[in-house]
Structure formats: C-alpha cells, structure tokens
C-alpha cells in the first residue's frame, strides 16, 4: 500500500541516485508525515460533524478543565497561540452557541469565556467519541509494535537534527 502524498513522490524522484540508506530514510520520514497528515484529515472530518475544528475543540476542553471560565488572554497563554487566533475561534464557538462571553464582574475591561450547557454536552460527547476513535487506531497494533512505535517517536522527537533546525530558525 502506498501512503505517500504526491509531494513526497516528487521529492523521492530527486533521490533516485542517492545511496539506498538515504533514500530509505527519507522515504520512511515521508511515510510518517503522510500517516500524520491522514490522521489529521480524518480528525478534522470527524470534528466537522459537530461544527468543530481541532482549535475550537481544544478551546472547549481547556475551558472545561479550568472549571468553565477563562479570559481570552488566559486561553491564549495556556494554548500558546495568539489572542487574535483565540478571538477567531471564540467567534465560531459563540455563533454555534457553545460558549458565552461575559464581562468580568471584578474588571469590566476583561471578558470571561464560559461554556454554555450545550457546549458542556458537546465537549463531553465529542471527547468520548474522539478518544475512542484515536485509541482504536493504536489498540489494533500488537503490544510489541506499539512499544516500538512509542520508542521510535520518542527518538525522532529527541533528534538533535530537530533541535538544531529549531535553533537555526529553519
């Protein structure tokens, strides 16, 4: 089965004359990227059934875990995103009647974001379904493959090449 995206095939064609271990390593990395992209697309499709994106869903989970009340700045800080991004996500959630914006009673310049009753039901229902779906993808792997995958992901994430690329701004 070929899981590579077209852009990866194009790049691999440029490596036809490269050493087999280089080509195989690049292909394996592209397969990992393609699998992650496929998971992300499926995730987006599943969340879209509830008029949610991953960002909206994470905002709702963050609100729920914080007891249901946070300011836009607190959401942005906890999620490491800009306040502008938070505003856009909140706009969509408010249109869907999943959150409410209220003036902070102690500081009228601040807003407090709360989940509506419908928002609480949606986040709970979607969370149960979403985690079952994600878990199902991995549960089908035999324990040895799961362990090998976990170790491989850890090693890749800790790669010095990633650290150097991040520091160089590449």
Image (cartoon, rainbow, N blue to C red):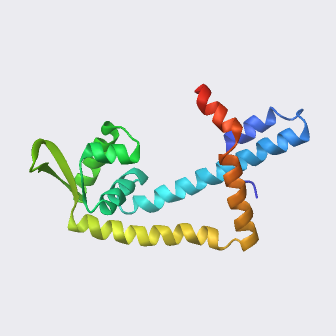
Please report the residue visible at 28 percent of the width from the left and 67 percent of the height from the top.
120
**Image location of residue 102, percent across then percent down:** 14, 51
**Image location of residue 151, percent across then percent down:** 71, 58
Q: Nearer the viewer, residue 131 or 34?
A: 131
Please report the residue visible at 40 percent of the width from the left and 62 percent of the height from the top.
49
Quadrant of the image containing the C terminus: top right
Q: Quadrant of residue 162?
A: top right
Q: Nearer the viewer, residue 169 or 96?
A: 169
Q: Is residue 146 visible?
A: yes
Q: On the picture, is 41 further left or further right than 99? A: right
Residue 79 lies, with reference to residue 50, above or below; the image says above
Please report the residue visible at 53 percent of the width from the left and 59 percent of the height from the top.
42
**Image location of residue 10, percent across then percent down:** 74, 36
Residue 34 lies, with reference to residue 143, above or below; the image says above
Q: Quadrant of residue 73?
A: top left
Q: Is residue 4 visible?
A: no
Residue 130 lies, with reference to residue 36, above or below; the image says below
Q: Nearer the viewer, residue 121 or 71?
A: 71
**Image location of residue 144, percent across then percent down:** 76, 70
Q: On the picture, is 159 further left or further right than 98? A: right
Quadrant of the image containing the N terminus: bottom right
Query: How many numbered tags mark residues here?
Result: 0
Furthest-top residue in view?
Answer: 168
Q: On the picture, is 26 further left or further right than 42? A: right
């Amino acid at each position: 089965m070929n899981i590579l995206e077209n852009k990866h095939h194009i790049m691999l064609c440029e490596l036809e004359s490269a050493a087999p271990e280089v080509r195989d390593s690049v292909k394996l990395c592209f397969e990992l990227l393609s699998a992650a992209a496929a998971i992300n697309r499926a995730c987006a499709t599943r969340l879209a059934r509830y008029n949610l994106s991953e960002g909206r869903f994470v905002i709702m989970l963050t609100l729920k875990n914080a007891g249901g009340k946070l300011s836009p700045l607190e959401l942005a800080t906890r999620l490491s995103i800009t306040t502008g991004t938070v505003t856009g996500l909140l706009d969509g959630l408010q249109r869907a009647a999943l959150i409410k914006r209220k003036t902070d009673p102690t500081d009228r310049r601040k807003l407090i974001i709360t989940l509506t009753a419908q928002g609480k039901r949606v986040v709970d229902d979607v969370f149960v379904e979403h985690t079952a779906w994600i878990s199902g993808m991995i549960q089908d792997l035999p324990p040895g493959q799961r362990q090998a995958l976990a170790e491989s992901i850890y090693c890749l994430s800790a790669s010095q090449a990633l650290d150097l690329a991040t520091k160089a701004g590449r």
